[in-house]
Amino acid sequence: MNRSNNKLWSFHGGLHLPGHKSISTGRAISKTFIPSRLILPLQQHIGESSELVTKIGDKVLKGQILARANGYVSVPLHAPTSGTITHIEEHIVPHPSGLSALCITIETDQKDEWIKIEETPDYKNMDPSALRNRIRDAGIVGLGGAGFPTFIKLNPGSRTAIDELIINAAECEPYISCDDMLMRERAQEIIQGVQIMQHALQARRCLIGIEDNKPEALAALNKALQLSGSGSIDIISIPTRYPAGGEKQLIKILTGKESPSHGLPLDIGVVCQNTGTAAAVSQAILHGKPLLSRVITLTGDGIKQPGNYDVLIGTPINELIEHSGGYHQSVKQLLMGGPMMGFNLDTDQLPVIKTTNCLLALCEPHTDSSQNVMPCIRCGACMDVCPVKLLPQQLYWQAYAKDFDKIQDYNLFDCIECGCCSYVCPSQIPLVQYYRFAKTEIWAQERDKIKSDHARERHEFRLERLEQEKREREERMRKKKAALQANKNKPGKNEAKKDAIAEALARVKAKQQNETIEPKNTNNLTPGQQQKIDDINNRRTKQKTVPDKQPEKNNASKSDNTAE
Amino acid sequence: MQFNKTTSINMHNSNNVSAVMLRVLLALLPGTLIYAYFFGWNILLNITIACITAVISEALMLYLRKRPIKPYMKDYSAILTACLLALALPTLAPWWLIVIATLFAIIIAKHLYGGLGYNPFNPAMVGYVVVMISFPQYMTQWLIPHNGLDLMQTLQLQLWGITPESIILDSITSATPIDSIKTGLSLQRPITEIGQSPLFGTLGGIGWEWITTGFFAGGLWLIYKRTIGWQIPVAMLSTIAAMSLVFNFISPELYAGPLLHLFNGGTVLAAFFIATDPVSASTTPKGRIIYAIGIGLLTYIIRTWGGYPDGIAFAVLLMNMAVPTIDYYTQPRIFGANR
């Protein structure tokens, strides 16, 4: 049901941005193509990196597991098409830092041969936990951008009831239109996915929030919803205002509830999922297909044929853009993600991953270089637009001064990095970059602190143990002395003591004689055994001469051993 | 293919510091033109002197501080300081007084504290207070409206201190209305009688009421354009109005009414253009209100019971000092925090 008269709430700040969406909505989503090779990072989600179960040279089929989930917050990774694994090595991955990470490279065989798959169309009879496992086994993560494993968000845990499942169809960031096109073309699939997720969560009702700049998508969803006959799903058109698609902002708009500052939407009985994720869930449950491809928007004036493309995960960006018609001659800048929250890439030799929603190529950057940056004049324009009601200018001062304690007093970690403040700053300060920097620094400091705390604790424990041993030794010595003293003072016992000493000496002598008789186990060795012993001795002396090169942990444990 | 990995932001609106400062300058225009209409060439000459001094000292300081001169000169902040200072100083202030005030504002109050964005005190008000304390005798020399001086006579009077023939200086100068109330009260005359003097018009002093209206219009336009927030002007003006209303109600003979306070002595100019200087003002919504109430209270107190002809400059500087504390304790409740 489309309840246009639904009561809506609003959030503080936000912006009306030029949409630039029609650049990429003119054509239908292009069909998947198979590139010559696929590069698949083992980590494409938040949590633990997946664990390899294949090796170089393996022939793999489409949908086959390449790496399995490693721990709870993890999902498996599948082969997006059939082919041969040619490399398993470090490769640059899409990340603001330009980092490298372990990737599997598949040389495709263009046959697109499927592994055997299992469909479960009667999911309604399935236990929610079994359903969650299926979603996990399909490798599904949040396709909106964060990449959090979907099955975890579908697990209400100890909460008995989830009030609302919210489907984020806002797609508020300029240029991006992949969710819009997906809704226009595959609305039925999305509604099916929503129903499956609602069943998995046992949610009372479901709200689909969609910005009112997508009338075609809205109509398509409404039609699909009518066909499905579901009574507990509402599609709600919301005003177009960036960042209405921020998880906490959308929940506020639709329900009036504010997710707690340091908590999750789950804490207020709400779970939020993306439309693309819903479609992937439907594919996984109804058709047994794991997450192998996604729709991404290729847009900007630097792209010859902008549009939306169904792309296999792992497709190299350069191959994708070449396949789509290539760059415009004067392209200067390539972004992954939108113009507000995306990050600049310095190369296109990178794969598309599960969380890639947009590639934006620009001929003229929206702002020119950092020459325009002026000092902050504290005008407060940033504060007026901040959807979290932070004081961005104060955060900036603290980040600039590297005062990482004070900056947390100003709630740095509540910043959603939407970029509204940077957009309006008259001094053109790249504010969000300062916040990202501060966050990374604080994380690094905390990691270091944990490490040094461990080392300190270990050290203190060792000192204490040594101290205790010393005390015990002294105590023994003291007792012995006292006993000796006592014996000395008893003259009658002196004779007995002399006898005892003589006896002991005799015993020792006898034992020494025995030892000379009995062969040691190092006698009568074969030349091979002797060689081994010499080798070991050599290595030991070598190690002793270069102790500094050993890792800290080994050193510590070694010193512990020697002390014992 | 390789790309430029710029560190700049990707999308931005058309706003920049120069545009902000230019809008403020533009908003000063109506009041300034009305000023010139009533009081003649003097004010324009004063503004020119202040601006030239400001531009030269700003360039010099940028050079000495090894900052890029061109982009910083283009931000118009020095010009704005100079204009506000010239509008605040008396019409008959000698040229060297204006130069000293401007130099102090730009060199000491602004650049020695770190330049644009870093000065804790409002530079124009620092310049004003310096000459107010150092040369009090010059700070009460105002022209009367429609004084009949032409451009040449103005230049002679201002630059060389030569009183034009056929004009007696005393006949064309007077105190400001606020100051004359103060003097009148000290002579035991009731407000109602002081208000009868030819200096006063319907709302405030003759001419001043219209100048104030001009600045008011400019200020409203700035709020409409969202260059300034509503909090500071509204809170400051209503505080002064409330204070004067209460005391005027208690004793109309001893305390001037709200209209006299609002339409005189640059109250409106200060509320919209000086107290709102973002660098030295509070930045949180609640903080701005507290800051402006503080300025309003102090202004009224100094005007009414203090020894200086006007208290706005002191009030602004005193509240500038309180800004870091106000900001710290008035952080808004963030999204999702406990109510």
Image: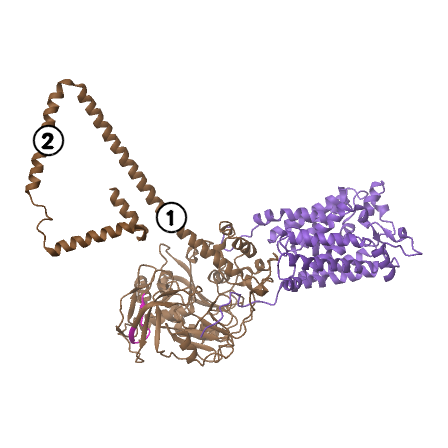
Residue B32 sits above or below residue A113 on the image? above
Q: How crowded is the residue under tag 1: few (<14 C-alpha within 10 Å), some, or many (20+)?
A: few
Does the rendering let one see residue A29?
no
Does the rendering let one see residue A404?
yes
Residue A113 sits above or below residue B334 on the image? below
Relative image position of residue B217 (x, y in whole percent): 73, 61
| Chain A, hue in figure | brown
Q: Which three-letter amino acid code belongs to the residue tagged 1? A: Ser
Residue closest to the eye, A421 or A368: A368
Residue A505: give its label: 2
Same chain assignment for discs 2 and 1: yes
- Residue at numbered disc 1: A452
Residue A228 horizontal side relative to residue B38, left or right? left
- SS class, disc 1: helix
Q: Which three-letter amino acid code belongs to the residue tagged 2? A: Leu
- Mark 1 belongs to which subunit? A
Q: Which chain is purple?
A: B
Q: CA distance from mark 2 to mark 1?
A: 53 Å
- SS class, disc 2: helix
Residue B52 horizontal side relative to residue A389, left or right? right
Residue A471 horizontal side relative to residue A511, left or right? right
Q: Residue at x 62, y 59 (%)?
A: B67
